[in-house]
Amino acid sequence: MTPLLAIAARSGTGKTTLLKALIPLLTAADIRPGLIKHTHHHMDIDSPGKDSYELRKAGAVQTLLASNQRWALMTETPEQENLDLYYLASQMDCSLIDIILVEGFKHEAVPKILLYRSATRHQPPHPELDEYVIAVASDVDLALPVPQFDLNNPEEICRFIIEWLKSSDGNNPG
């Protein structure tokens, strides 16, 4: 299975900002990233009034939108209470990617980098409470039992991810 690495933090900490910087850096290092993003909001990638939207709303359980540039598969899951990260990862084409970056899913049993931004006024992370935390990225120095990186230095975080992939094959918690 393709290695999973979660970028986890409270809302407003900068998960998306960091991932937007990391993805091109990983790509430049010949690592093909995939992404699974967790959202707590009702989401719809299709637009009302479009044929595909209307057909899906008519009762299609799965709808695949396709063009020459990309395709997207939507699956209706109204009866599913909890998302299964490993099931979602299994739906990705592992022949196209080297790592699956996960935004969110902070309570999942997958390797993760916790983010902390002092301006959010949230509690600093406690990586010792989660055996899957492999590092913390923060904008302030914290005394932690795991490697710590500057949240505003995506190049440094990227180098760590590359070394983690090489040393652990991405399958171990640390």
Image: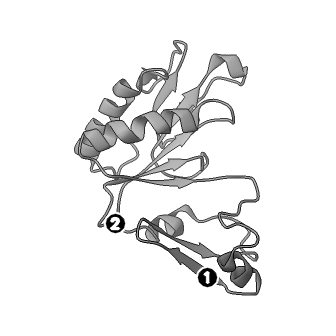
Residue 60 appears at what percent x and percent y? 68, 86
Q: Residue at x 64, y 23 (%)?
A: 124
Residue 121 appears at what percent x and percent y? 73, 20
Q: Residue at x 53, y 15 (%)?
A: 142
Asked if residue 43 is positioned above or below residue 101 in the image, the reply reads below
Q: Residue at x 44, y 66 (%)?
A: 70
Classed neighbour count for the residue bearing mark 2: other residues with Cα under 10 Å, few (<14), some (14–19), many (≥20): some
Q: CA distance from mark 1 to mark 2?
A: 21 Å
Residue position marked by numbered label 2 in the rendering = 94
Quadrant housing the N terminus? bottom left
* Residue 14 relative to residue 71: left or right: right
* Residue 155 relative to residue 44: left or right: left
Quadrant housing the C terminus? top left
Q: Looking at the image, can residue 76 be seen?
A: no
Q: Which mark is residue 11?
A: none
Asked if residue 99 is positioned above or below residue 84 in the image, the reply reads above
Give the color scheme: rainbow, by chain, secondary structure or one colour.
Answer: one colour
Classed neighbour count for the residue bearing mark 1: other residues with Cα under 10 Å, few (<14), some (14–19), many (≥20): few
Which amino acid lies under the numbered mark 1 shown in the image of this protein? Gln
Comparing labels 1 and 2, the label whose residue is closer to the camera: 1
- Pick whichever of labels 1 and 2 is earlier in the sequence: 1
Which amino acid lies under the numbered mark 2 shown in the image of this protein? Cys
Asked if residue 151 is positioned above or below residue 21 in the image, the reply reads above
Residue position marked by numbered label 1 in the rendering = 62
Q: Secondary structure at mark 2?
A: loop
